[in-house]
Image (tube, helix red, strand yellow):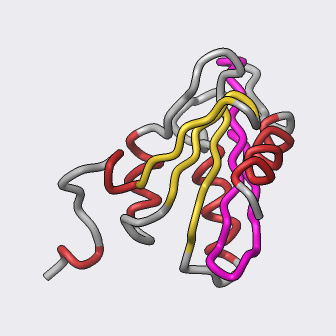
Amino acid sequence: MTDKDLIKLALEAREKAYVPYSNFKVGAALLAKDGTVFTGCNVESASYSPTTCGERTALLKAVSEGYREFDTIAVVGSLEKISFPCGVCRQFLREFGLEIRVIVATSADNYQVRLLKDLLPDSFGPEDLV
C-alpha cells in the first residue's frame, strides 16, 4: 500500500464524517503491520465531549478487531490546509508505539510525513507505568 493509496482511503472516509456542528470533516486510514487497513471519520455529538476524531475511530475499529501493531496512519482534514492530529489523538496513537508514520494531507499529491515521536516529544507511554 502506497502513501497515496492510504491518503485516498482517508479522503473517502472523510466524506462519511458526521459533523453537523463544526462542519470540519476528518478522515483517517490506519495501516496495520500486516497490511490490513482500518478507516475512520469524525463523529460529533451535540454535547461535544463525546465527539470522536477520525484517527481514534480508525484505531478503535482496529483494536476491537484484535490489532495492536500499526505502521502508518493517513489523516485528511481541511482540503486547503494540512491538519495534524489533535493532542488526544496523538496520545491515543502513542499507546501503540512512537514509530508510527503519520501522513497528513489535503490530497494524494499534497502531503507531509512525520513519525509520531516527532509530533509528541517526551511523551508518556505504557512503558512509563510502574
Is 9 situated left or right of 45 in this image? right
Residue 16 drawn in magenta? no
Location of residue 67 in the rendering, given as x and y in whole percent from the top left corner: 63, 80
Quadrant in the rendering for residue 83: top right
Q: Residue furthest left?
A: 130
Q: Quadrant of the N terminus?
A: bottom right
Query: In front: 71, or 123?
Result: 71
Location of residue 109 in the rendering, given as x and y in whole percent from the top left corner: 73, 33
Is 104 situated left or right of 5 in this image? left
Task: Name the residue: 23% across, 50% down.
Answer: 121
Location of residue 63 in the rendering, given as x and y in whole percent from the top left corner: 62, 74
Task: Name the residue: 73% across, 76% down.
Answer: 35
- Taking 60 as reference, is 91 above or below it? above
| Magenta residues, start to end | 21-43
Task: Name the residue: 76% across, 56% down.
Answer: 39
Task: Name the residue: 41% across, 66% down.
Answer: 99
